[in-house]
Amino acid sequence: MQSLDELLSQEPHATFHDATVVEVQHDATAGRAALTADLCVGDPEASTVDERERRRRGRLSLQGVRLWRRDGSDPAVSAPGNWLTAEGPLAEATSELARALHRDFETEPYCWYLYFSDSNSFLYWTARNVAFEWEGSARPAV
């Protein structure tokens, strides 16, 4: 998997970029996590703003989580941000911590990072299984 966007096949223009995260759950004991977000599904070439800015809520579910680590500029904030602006394989992250974590977990099937612009923070995770499910239908952006 090169991008989490590959999980979004039901919506041809869907992307995690600029998603608004509404809930993050992590259960270290059970080894699972979930991220619920409003994702942009609008057609960037559409003629109206409403068509371009359509959003749809979905849930990214992770099973077999062995790594769940936040790296942020404000240690007093324990949660990641809400504005997800980048994601990708942990091997592509450039921080020293990311490189160290990648070395420790590179054999995991999914070894990933998420970057939240509003909190200037990263969330690094690994999982054995990754799934995505849409919740409801698309709606205009607010």
Image (cartoon, rainbow, N blue to C red):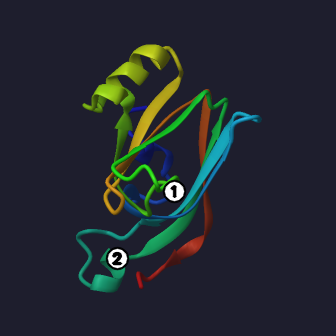
- Count residues near mark 2 (Cα–Cα under 10 Å), then give few for <14, some for 14-19, many for 20+: some
Q: Amino acid at mark 1?
A: Gln
Q: Position of residue 114 (x, y in %)?
A: 40, 45
Q: Would you identify the image quadrant in which residue 136 lies?
A: bottom right
Who's the residue at 33% across and 23% down the image? 99
Q: Are marks 2 and 1 in contact (CB under 8 Å)?
A: no
> Could you say which is closer to the camera, residue 79 or residue 127?
79
Q: Position of residue 101 (x, y in %)?
A: 42, 23
- Count residues near mark 1 (Cα–Cα under 10 Å), then give few for <14, some for 14-19, many for 20+: few
> In the image, 137: left or right of 124?
right
Who's the residue at 36% across and 49% down the image? 121
Who's the residue at 47% across and 28% down the image? 111
Secondary structure of the residue carrying tag 1 is loop
Q: Would you identify the image quadrant in which residue 102 lies?
A: top left
Q: Which mark is residue 10?
A: 1
> In the image, 118: left or right of 109?
left
Q: Position of residue 62 (x, y in %)?
A: 62, 40
